Amino acid sequence: MLIFVLVMGLFLAACGGGEDTGSADNGGSDDGGETTNDSNDSGSGDAADEPEFEKQTWRFITEELDGQVQYEYAEEFANRISEKTGGAVTIQPYEYGGLGSEVDQVKQLQDGAVELAVMSPGFTGGMVKEGQLFALHYLFPSDQRKTQDILNTSEALNTDLKERYEEYSISPLAYWTEGAMAWTSNVGIEEPKDFDGLKMRVQESPLMMESYKAYGAAPQALSWSELYTGLERGTVEGQENPIFFIYDASFNEVQDTMTISNHNNYVAMTTANTEWFNSLPANLKTVVTETITEMQDWVFNKQEELNSSFLEEIKNDTEYPTEIIELTEEQRNAFKEKALPVRDFYRENVSTVDGAILDKLIEEIKTAE
């Protein structure tokens, strides 16, 4: 019992001393407070250090090859997005054919198998009928800068036509020109009668076919992957494309003449899968839309650079000499006269809204000019 009393006395003295020390030593109390606060600060710091963007990879398909405008665009876009997200978002650009044909690529974007694509409206013409208006000849100004400005600001395109595409899970985020179209052939196209019976290659677009029928041609739909061989063998006898593409795809090797006609522009669309784009976090969606806006000037300058330099390459190519025909204003007007009635064909046989989007665009073009 005595031992028990002595032990308990020592135990209580120790407890009492601990409590006195804790209450009397303000430093001890403060240290305890600081320790608690440090713990809280550490927790806040961890939250602040969380990355702003989650790591992810997007696939970006194009209709062209490395060195051509669309692929160059996709690479530049990928670099800018990576930089702005601190490397969190990786974008893998794909050359044409890497994931199938143009038609395959449209389907992959719709299904969400890929997130982004550069595509031309011609390959979606059977689905989004209003988009065929880009096939109308002599619709846009011959001045490329004015055309790009219209593509940037047009409500008919960026609101009305965009809504039509989104019905099919495709969101056009921007429209841009890859340059004025030129005709190549072995007959030397200078007036409409030069098209008589010419087997002209076109994309899968009923309106493109109608546009060339108006000149008297015999249009044939053909994928561009088959075009070189088709021209070489005479399966098709003529084609249209921007100058940079004509040279880079070596069409000048199997065609004797190139007509600078300015009859149309090769319009491309930066597109995204609608559901995927709408599901992006607000901060990431802002990065994407800001980058697309920045890219409009970049891609305009890039296409100008390539079209100009490749025109010189064609002129100076002695192994495959090409006659360059540049239409006068009078010659262009002869083609335009044949082309204008095709707009009525579009309104009556293609458009699902009686040409309302086209008519709105025409008014916007008149204002811009």
Image (cartoon, rainbow, N blue to C red):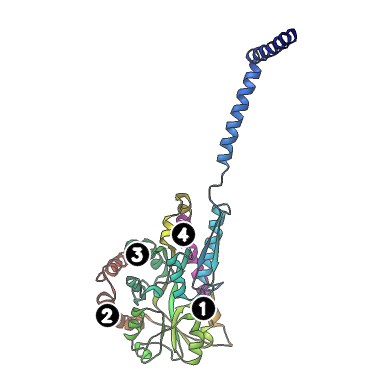
Q: How crowded is mark 4: few (under 14 residues within 10 Å), some or many (20 or more)?
A: some
Residue ID for mark 1: 311
Instruction: Looking at the image, tell me whether mark 2 or mark 1 is earlier in sequence order.
Output: 1
Using the numbered discs, state the Cα–Cα distance from disc 2 to disc 3 in whole angstroms: 29 Å
Using the numbered discs, state the Cα–Cα distance from disc 2 to disc 4 in whole angstroms: 35 Å
What amino acid is at disc 3? Glu
Magenta stretch, overall SS: helix
In the image, is residue 306 above or below residue 332? above
In the image, is residue 64 above or below residue 193? above
Residue ID at (57%, 84%): 317
- At mark 4, the secondary structure is helix
Residue ID for mark 4: 292
Residue 345, percent from left and from top: 27, 79
Q: In this view, does 124 lie to the left or right of 96?
A: left
Residue ID for mark 2: 341
**Residue 75 visible from this viewpoint:** no
Residue ID for mark 3: 167
